[in-house]
Image (tube, rainbow, N blue to C red):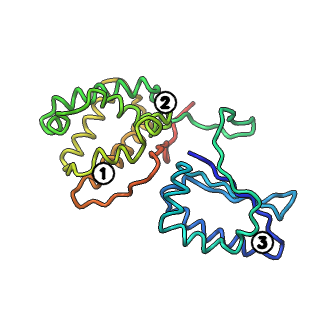
Amino acid sequence: MVIEYIRYRVPPERVGGFEAAYERAAEILRTAPQCVDYELSRCQDDPACYVLRIRWTSTDDHLREFRGGPLFPKFLAEIRPYVEDIEEMRHYSGTAVVGSGGAAPSVPPSLYEWAGGSDAFEKLCDAFYRLVRADELLAPMFARMDPEHPRYVALWLAEVFGGPTAYTEGRGGYRHMLGKHLGRAISEAQRRRWVNLMMDAADEVGLPDDPEFRAAFASYLEWGTRLALQNSQPDADPVREAPVPRWGWGVAPPYQG
């Protein structure tokens, strides 16, 4: 991911219109698959100064996919009157210097950490695909499976649940995973068996069985397999560019007494 910072200096008589324009433009950013999140801040010490932060899936996704796509003309139409007020517009990459201060609220561990890290997901996928190979419904789908496939799925799940972005960096992220499902015509029976065997594998390898973790884990399996089923149908027209989903605890964070 990359962070774009745009620094504005807006004359006082234009401030009201500027913020209203970005409220409208934000509606477009919310629908852009290349946009992760955004924030517009106003300087307390110099109220004419604004900084817009937009986190994009990549620089190329921003410059080629978003700016070259159908949403950009609508976005530009909203903020065009304020382009002349831009003082800086650049892309930045994060560094290793990151953390929380003493005033930060307590943050629960990620699902990745709670599960036991990369080793836990590798054991999970090894057990899962052993069950798949012995299953009469799913085995034919994976008859020509790459021997490294369990490891690749472990990388995907680790990233989804809050771990390293190794699948995005090494395997091509969402687009690559989508390509594995296109045209496969997955059935509802196969989808359900996939979920059931994954839950069986989670029991076998000793993934945490507290209600909070299992609820979050199962919710992703349901969401992910239903999306894969839809995308695999012959008439599907799925979104081609999107970040790897990052799954959290939802409404039930872990109990830490």
Of the numbered discs in the image, which one, if any, rests on residue 199? none
Q: Amino acid at mark 1?
A: Arg
Residue to which mark 3 is pinned: 15
The quarter in which the C terminus is drawn is top right
Give the farthest residue toward the right.
45
Quarter of the rendering containing residue 126: top left
Q: Secondary structure at mark 1?
A: helix
Instruction: Determine the residue positioned at 21% across, 57% down.
Output: 234
Q: Amino acid at mark 3?
A: Val
Q: Of label 1 and label 2, which has the lower sequence position? A: 2
- Using the numbered discs, state the Cα–Cα distance from disc 3 to disc 2 in whole angstroms: 46 Å
**Relative image position of residue 210 (x, y in whole percent):** 42, 32
**Relative image position of residue 13 (x, y in whole percent):** 82, 76
Question: Above or below — where is 191 with respect to 114?
Answer: below
Q: Nearer the viewer, mark 1 or mark 2?
A: 1
- Using the numbered discs, state the Cα–Cα distance from disc 1 to disc 2 in whole angstroms: 25 Å
Instruction: Determine the residue positioned at 58% across, 54% down.
Output: 37
Residue to which mark 2 is pinned: 114
Q: Amino acid at mark 2?
A: Trp
Q: Of label 3 and label 2, which has the lower sequence position? A: 3
Quarter of the rendering containing residue 19: bottom right
The quarter in which the N terminus is drawn is top right
Residue to which mark 1 is pinned: 226
Q: Secondary structure at mark 2?
A: helix
